[in-house]
Image (tube, rainbow, N blue to C red):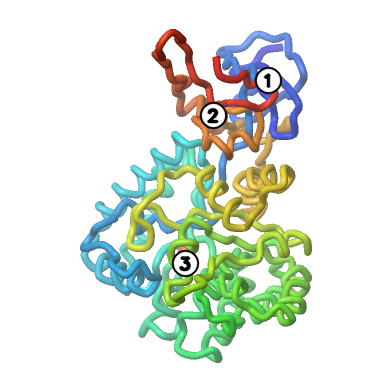
Amino acid sequence: MSFDLLVRGGTLPDGRVADIGIRGERIAAVEPRLEAEAGRVIDAAGDLVAPPFVDPHFHMDATLSYGLPRVNASGTLLEGISLWGELREIATVDEMVGRAVTYCDWAASMGLLAIRSHVDTTPGHLRGAEAMLEVRRRVAGYIDLQLVAFPQDGLYRAPEGRANLIRALDMGLDVVGGIPHFERTMEEGAESLRDLARIASDRGLMWDVHCDETDDPMSRHVETMAREVTRHGLGGRAAGSHLTSMHSMDNYYVSKLIPLIAESGMTAIPNPLINITLQGRHDTYPKRRGLTRVKELQAAGVTVGWGQDCVLDPWYSLGTADMLDVAFMGLHVAQMTHPEEMARCFRMVTEDNARIMGLEGYGLAPGCLASLVVLDAGDPVEAVRLRTDRLAVVSKGRVIAERARNDTRLSLPGRPASVRRRHAAGSGTNG
Ligand code: FE2
C-alpha cells in the first residue's frame, strides 16, 4: 500500500485520532494507523485535522478596496452601498481581478478553500461579473468559487436591474441573488422574490438572497422567500442571507415564521462580523445587535452557517479571510457558550457551510476530495478560542500552504519559559 501524501496522527473534529492516506485528488484511507509508504508525510500528532473552511457569503468584487475612493464615515449599510456605487464605476477589471486574487491567496493560507461570492450585476458594463469569472478561472485549481448574480441596487429599483442580472447569469454566474428589502416597496420586494424564485427554478440554479438586512421588524420578506422555496421545491439549494430583521421581530410572529422556514428546507447565513457593526446604527440605547435568531433556527432543524461577507471594503474595515474570526464573533453575539454550542460554531464554518453551498466530496472520509487543514489546536473549541495558526493546508491532494508553529519564548527574571496558549487535552500547556 502506498500513498502520495500521508497526514499522520492528527485529531479529527469528532475526536478520533487517525492517519489520512491520500492518492491523487482523493482521500484513499482513514484509519487509526496506516502502515504504508508515502511520497510525503505530514506529522499532525497532537494537532487538529479538519476539512477546509468554507465561506458561503462574501463580496469578492469589492474586497481589499478599503479607502477607495474614501472611507465609510457613518458606518452604515446605506453609506456603504452608495460608496460602492462610486467605486464600481471607476474600478477596472484588472484592478478587481488583482485584489480578488490577492484575497484568494489570503484565503488559501487560512485553509479557506470554498467561497460563495455575490457579484454586483447592477451596472450595464458588468465589469464585476467579467472580473469574477476571470478570478474563478485563475483559482479553480485550489479554491471552489461560486458566483451569485446579485442585483445590489434592486431588481426593479435599478433601471436595468433585472435585465443585467439575466445577462450576468448568461455569462456564467451560477447562483441567483436578490435584495427584496432594498426594492422601492414591500410589494415590489415580494414580487422580486417570486420573480427570482422562478428564474432559479427554470434554470436549475441555487438561490441566495440578501434578505431583510435591516433593523425594521416589519421587513418580513423571509416569509415570502420561504413560501417561494416551498412552492418551487428549492429547499436544498436556497439560502436566506443576513435575516437581521428577525432579531427585532415580535416573538409571536417569529413562532409562526421559523416553522415555515424549516418546512421550506432553506438554509440561513448570518454574517456576524459585519452585522454587529452595521446594525443598530439608528438606535440610541439600548442598541440592538442585529444578528438573526441563530440558536432558535438551529433548534427548529434549519442549517445555519456563518458567513464573512466583507474584508476591507466599503462596509467593513477589517478582516483577514479567517473563518475562525467569524465563528468567534458569532459565538459571542449569539451567546453560543455551551461546549456543544462552541463546537457547533466550528462545524458552522466547515460542515454546515459546505452543506449550504452543496459542495461535492467534502469531508474527511475515504472517497472525499483530499482537501484539509492542519490546525495548531487540540480540538475544534480550542481552534475557535485561539483563532489558531494553520500549520498546513492541503487542496485536492496538494500541499498549498505551510507555516511554522508560533510559540513565544519568554525571558522572565529567573524563569525561562515558552508559551503555548493551547490547553485542550493532548495539546500540552505552558512550558
Ligand atoms: Fe452581503
Give the label, 1 or 3, closer to the camera.
Answer: 1
Q: Is ligand 1 closer than 8 angstroms to the Cβ of mark 3?
A: no
| Kind of residue sitting beneath label 2 | Val
Work out how far the residue at label 2 is from the one at label 3, CA to CA, in angstroms: 30 Å
Q: How crowded is mark 3: few (under 14 residues within 10 Å), some or many (20 or more)?
A: many
Residue 394 is tagged as 2
| Kind of residue sitting beneath label 3 | Ala
| Kind of residue sitting beneath label 1 | Gly
* Picture coordinates of residue 422, whole percent (x, y): 58, 26
Q: What residue appears at the point 60 percent right and 68 percent down from the top-left corner?
A: 240
- Label 2 residue SS: strand
Out of 176 and 46, give the one closest to the viewer.
Answer: 46
Q: For mark 1, what is the residue?
A: 426
Whether tag 1 and tag 3 are in contact, CB under 8 A, the answer is: no
* Picture coordinates of residue 168, whole percent (x, y): 42, 68
Q: Residues within 10 Å of mark 1 (few under 14, many from 20)?
A: some
Q: For mark 3, what is the residue?
A: 149
* Picture coordinates of residue 250, whole percent (x, y): 67, 81
Using residue 320 as the reference point, say whether residue 221 is left or right of it: right
